[in-house]
Image (spheres, helix red, strand yellow):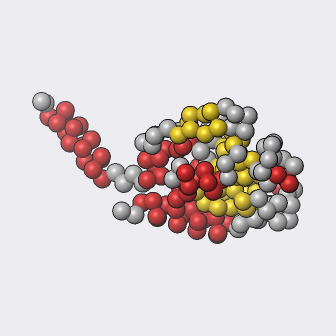
Amino acid sequence: MNAKAAFLAFTCILIAGISNATADELLDLETRDLAEMKTVSGITVVFDPGKISMVYTLPRSSGLSSGRSGSTTNILGLSGGPQEVGETADSLLDRLNLRQYFIPLTLPDGIPVWVKASSVSFFRAIEPWDHIRAEAKSAVNAGGRAIFVKEGVTTIKDAINAVRRQNRSP
């Protein structure tokens, strides 16, 4: 083995040894088993749980739920639009053991939404040009989608940092 190859091998081993990949990063590197769920239309979908960026349950009374009875949970990040399932967001996150990667936020109309901390690319305070309900305090871009939420910037930052600290702890 020549000196260049030995140096390259040593460097790769060194970098791998000091890499502090968090559980959240590993989740994105497809280290989990595939999961299954049934949509409200009865289709079984097999998916990578690490791709979920946002989950929220619409109550039947909202008029936005397409579920026949009860509520409909929308899962974002698996395809171009939301996947609708009859399982609640809480139940889904618990069943897939994902809760520790998500932060709870609230839409302006009071609907709770779970956002994957690592899918948040940026967030900011509401600006006058947003023309959104007064209850909204922040705009959050998660998984390429902008949402407005009731929580302030400091609360969101603290929640994301708490998830990051929790998931990098041994």
In the picture provided, is 46 more to the left or to the right than 145?
left
With 167 as the anchor, is 5 left or right in this view? left
Where, quadrant-wise, is the C terminus in this rendering? Answer: bottom left
Q: Of residues 158 and 86, which is closer to you in this image?
A: 86
Q: Quadrant of residue 134?
A: bottom right
Q: x, y percentage for residue 48?
A: 53, 39
Quick check: 155 above or below 58?
below
Q: Residue furthest front?
A: 69
Quarter of the rendering containing residue 94: bottom right
- The residue lying at 61 percent from left, 47 percent from top is 53
Residue at the left extreme?
Answer: 1
Q: Is residue 34 visible?
A: yes
Quadrant of residue 52 in the image? Answer: top right
Tell me residue 88's x, y (percent).
67, 52
Q: Nearer the viewer, residue 48 or 124?
A: 48
Any part of residue 145 in sight: no
Give the answer, above or below, for where 141 lies relative to 136. above
In the image, taking residue 43 as reference, residue 5 lies left or right, namely left
At which x and y percent is residue 119?
59, 49
- Residue at position x 49%, y 38% in the image: 34
Question: In the image, 142: left or right of 26?
Answer: right
Quick one: quadrant of the N terminus? top left
User: How many marks are shown on the rendered structure?
Assistant: 0
x 20%, y 42%: residue: 10
Out of 152 and 29, give the one closest to the viewer: 29
Pick the residue in front: 26 or 129: 26
Residue 82, percent from left and from top: 71, 40
Residue in the image at 61% along x and 54% along y: 91
